[in-house]
Amino acid sequence: MSIHDTRSAKRPEPDQPLVDIADYVIDYVIDSTEAYDTARYMLLDSLGTALMAMRFPECVKHLGPVVPGATLPGGARVPGTSHELDPVQAAFAIGTQIRWLDFNDTWLAAEWGHPSDNLGAILAVADYLSRKAEREGGQPMTVRDVLAYTIKAHEIQGCYALRNSFNRVGQDHVILVRLASTAVATAMLGGDKEQIVTALSHSWIDNGALRTYRHAPNTGPRKSWAAGDACRRAVIHAINAVHRGVVGYPSALSAATWGYYDVAFGGKAFEFERPFGSYVMENVLFKISFPAEFHAQTAVECAMQLHEQVADRLEQIDKVVIETQAAGCRIIDKTGPLANYADRDHCIQYMVAVPLIFGRLMAEDYGDAVAADPRIDSLREKTVVTENPQFTLDYFDPDKRYIGNAVQVFFKDGSSTARVSVDYPIGHRKRRVEGIPLLLKKFEAAMHGHLPAHRARVVLEQVADPATFDSMPVQRFMELFTL
């Protein structure tokens, strides 16, 4: 969408999408009780997932200072560690922890993503600012403030994802993590609308990371720290805009030839289904039962239901049929050798084979030890993945947002199991009553799994009452997770 003359040096007015985000972040008052309640669960779930990731050395090695000794006493803390870092590197570390296991919340539409990734930037900046305020006699942020910023970050990322497919131009969804985190981090640092627009323009000028690391034949663990990288970059843009007075680029999107639309988006402007509000947080999808790419969550549920019928007949299986949505076919339908953890947790055949065989799917099941079981690859080779057009339609329906899958097993003697179909997983809004108690059990298990017993008890006591939890200063909250 080239609308500015490249020969004219006159600066245009800022692109409207930049202005709309700035207006929303500064002016919009969140009055949705459901959004705040959901955000509270999202915060707990994300921190639980972050602590669960501490069992994996490949994650832990990313969490310290960028070079040995580059710490910042009094800076931002990294949950489950003793690290105190500058907010830029802390944003990377926290974002990496939350995303590592592919077990935090999810948003699915034209673009896919994980809005709680933004907590990397939000918690790092909030802890840094609150500790600084406490030292200087100022007013620290509260958990309620963090919840408000997360609702807005979710909304920005999610509303962009509804109609704009960055994956179709080969770019990774973390471009929207960087966008949303840049907006709210700039506001948290005291930035005004003009400074938010400036920071956002720099975010778009960064362009996007390629999705190469999410797809065969190059799937790899960068996908587990890509969101942390986006959070880190977002905090840099926010600091530059607020504290260093960098110049903004008002037509970063629409400039002819050199703007984002022309360079990276096929010359098209962004499209929007709805104005910013609190819709995304209210409808966000939680990963509660399985650390699996979300398009496969209901497929795993189906496989779990079939486990007892097939576990003793594995050698008799002729074919496993998985029906999924178009997005599932595009992202996680994968054949051939799987090289690593990241390869396996983005393979629907693998994610169905494991529960069919073992009756479970845990993070450890993506490791080399479990993957070496020859029965898994044997089942993968017998698995056929097809698109179910109705699942695709329901996936895009704004009143449904289903993520349907069906699984059926056929045996060599001509018999078969029933076709088991699940429209939406336990983390869906329509299953909140069923899902939230299990989400809280997931959080409790994560606390006891990584923190000393007395500290885990304190955490659980402090977060039990919403009013008490909301009023807690952020630095006190983050202190609960420090070792």
Image (cartoon, rainbow, N blue to C red):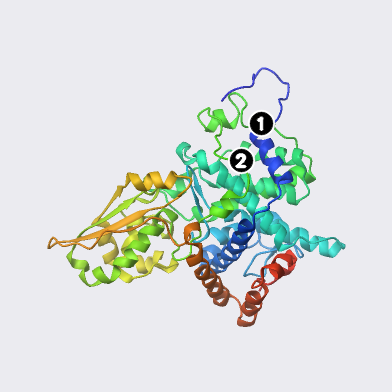
Q: Secondary structure at mark 2?
A: loop
Q: Position of residue 155 (x, y in %)?
A: 60, 48
Q: Position of residue 167 (x, y in %)?
A: 47, 41
Q: Earlier in the sequence, mark 2 or mark 1?
A: 1
Residue 474 lies in quadrant: bottom right
Toward the top, the furthest residue is 7
Residue 321 in sight in this render: yes
Amino acid carrying label 2: it is: Pro
Q: Position of residue 122 (x, y in %)?
A: 67, 55
> In the picture shown, does residue 241 fall above or below 123?
above
Q: Nearer the viewer, residue 327 or 418?
A: 418
Quadrant of the image containing the C terminus:
bottom right
Q: Secondary structure at mark 1?
A: loop
Q: Which mark is residue 15?
A: 1
Horizontal side of 469 relative to 317 (left or right) equals: right
Report if the CB atoms under discs 2 and 1 are less than 8 Å apart. no
Q: How many marks?
A: 2
Q: Position of residue 230 (x, y in %)?
A: 60, 49
Residue 86 in sight in this render: no
Q: Point out the frontmost of discs 2 and 1.
A: 2
Q: Nearer the viewer, residue 400 or 416?
A: 400
Q: Which residue is mark 2?
A: 275
Toward the right, the furthest residue is 137
Q: Which mark is residue 142?
A: none
The structure residue drawn at horizontal position 48% and vertical position 64%, both measured from the top left corner, is 288
The structure residue drawn at horizontal position 82% and vertical position 61%, both measured from the top left corner, is 139
Residue 259 lies in quadrant: top right
